[in-house]
Amino acid sequence: MPDSRPVLSIVVPLYNEAENLDYLFERLERVCDRLQVSYEIICIDDGSRDGTLNQLRAHHHRNPAIKVLGLSRNFGKELALSAGLDYASGDAVVPIDADLQDPPELLELLMAKWRQGYDVVLATRRSRAGESWLKRLTASGFYKTIGRMSPISIPSNTGDFRLMDRRVVEVLQQMPERTRFMKGLFAWVGFRQTAVEYDRQPRYRGRTSWNYWRLWNFAVDGLTSFSLLPLKVWSYVGLLISALAFSYATFLVVRTVLFGVDLPGFASIMVAILFIGGIQLISLGVLGEYLGRVYEEVKGRPLYIVRDRYGFEGDRLPSGFKDDVSR
Ligand code: UDP
Ligand code: MG
């Protein structure tokens, strides 16, 4: 089936983005027409509560290159994106946000670099308009931390907006893990990478669904998926504290032998107990974070569940399958 393998697949995860759809497709279609390649736009409705899915369906009927996956509930952006990547069949695949923060016009530059032979072309944010200083500060803090803690170097100021060659996408489709920190996975696979810069725009319409609590959890997911440092550090902390305790004990024994018993010491005992107790709870908490994730992985549930599918009839189904109630 020649038309089932387009050159370019654009993958758009959407959660309550009804207001942005018309303008999004207008701009995407204009760029794709200019590029003069066969394309598909895979839209994943991530359990939206507004009219996103209905509108997507209407757009699919207008332009069959727009293909729609409707997930059975909100699975979160990372999983919605994974679903889209599983279904993408193009030679080049580009995930893009639905709110037009990533300008579709950059696709031309991404494609040009891809044609030069790069497997991955990152779109790096030169500036982030429309984001508060607190968000910028926490974002840069996060990138610094994960940069130091993880053996994989995760490019900072780079979101999911990038072009990937089919080979890269096939590797990503093979990854079975449930905690999908996409930026990290993208970096983990390697391949020949290059970057282009762009100015990140403010959201076109609607509001971001990422509050700080969600971002924090996202950051913890990233750190635990790509670094074992928080898990390993406790042996060293324990070792250090034991060494200190041992020297202090020696000192106490020697002092008691030489100078006799000296009773006061309530404060120091309290401090020691509370300190050690705190350290133990923290380390247990960290163990819990990892253990919880191991549990999630071991359950082996599907990553996402596709409820509706429009435009995939006759197309090849995704290779690795982690989903699909309809078969
Ligand atoms: N998104 C999604 N599922 C979610 C949350 C967000 O598919 O649970 C999509 C959203 O529709 C958008 C993209 O992920 O296309 C980025 O989301 P958003 O603009 O809210 O994030 P931000 O740009 O603030 O990081
Ligand atoms: Mg956004």
Image (cartoon, rainbow, N blue to C red):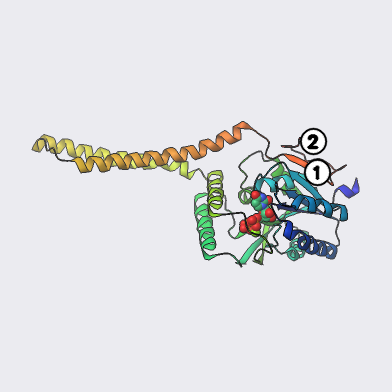
Q: Residue at position x 62%, y 51% from top?
A: 183
Q: Residue at position x 82%, y 65% from top?
A: 30
In the rendered image, the quadrant that contains the N terminus is: top right
Q: Dividing the image into four equal quarters, which quarter contains ligand 1?
A: bottom right
Q: Position of residue 75 (x, y in %)?
A: 66, 44
Q: Position of residue 28 (x, y in %)?
A: 79, 61
Does the closest atom of ligand 1 sit within 8 Å of the Cβ of label 2?
A: no
**Label 2, label 1: how many angstroms apart (C-alpha)?**
9 Å
Left or right: residue 269 versus residue 278 is left
Say which residue label 2 marks.
326
Q: Residue at position x 75%, y 45% from top?
A: 70
Left or right: residue 21 versus residue 234 is right
**Proximity of marks 2 and 1: CB atoms separated by less than 8 Å:** yes
Name which residue type carries label 2. Ser
Name which residue type carries label 1. Arg
Name the secondary structure under disc 1: strand
Structural crowding at the residue carrying mark 2, measured as other residues with C-alpha within 10 Å and reported as few (<14), some (14–19) or many (≥20)? few
- Please, is residue 111 above or below residue 270 in the view? below
In the rendered image, the quadrant that contains the C terminus is: top right
Which label number is shown at residue 309?
1
Whichever of callouts 2 and 1 sits on the residue coming sooner in the sequence is 1
Q: Position of residue 227 (x, y in %)?
A: 52, 45
Q: Residue at position x 63%, y 64% from top?
A: 125
Q: Position of residue 190 (x, y in %)?
A: 65, 50
Q: Is residue 295 visible?
A: yes
In the current view of this chain or complex, which residue is farthest to the top? 299
Q: Is residue 159 visible?
A: no
Structural crowding at the residue carrying mark 1, measured as other residues with C-alpha within 10 Å and reported as few (<14), some (14–19) or many (≥20)? some
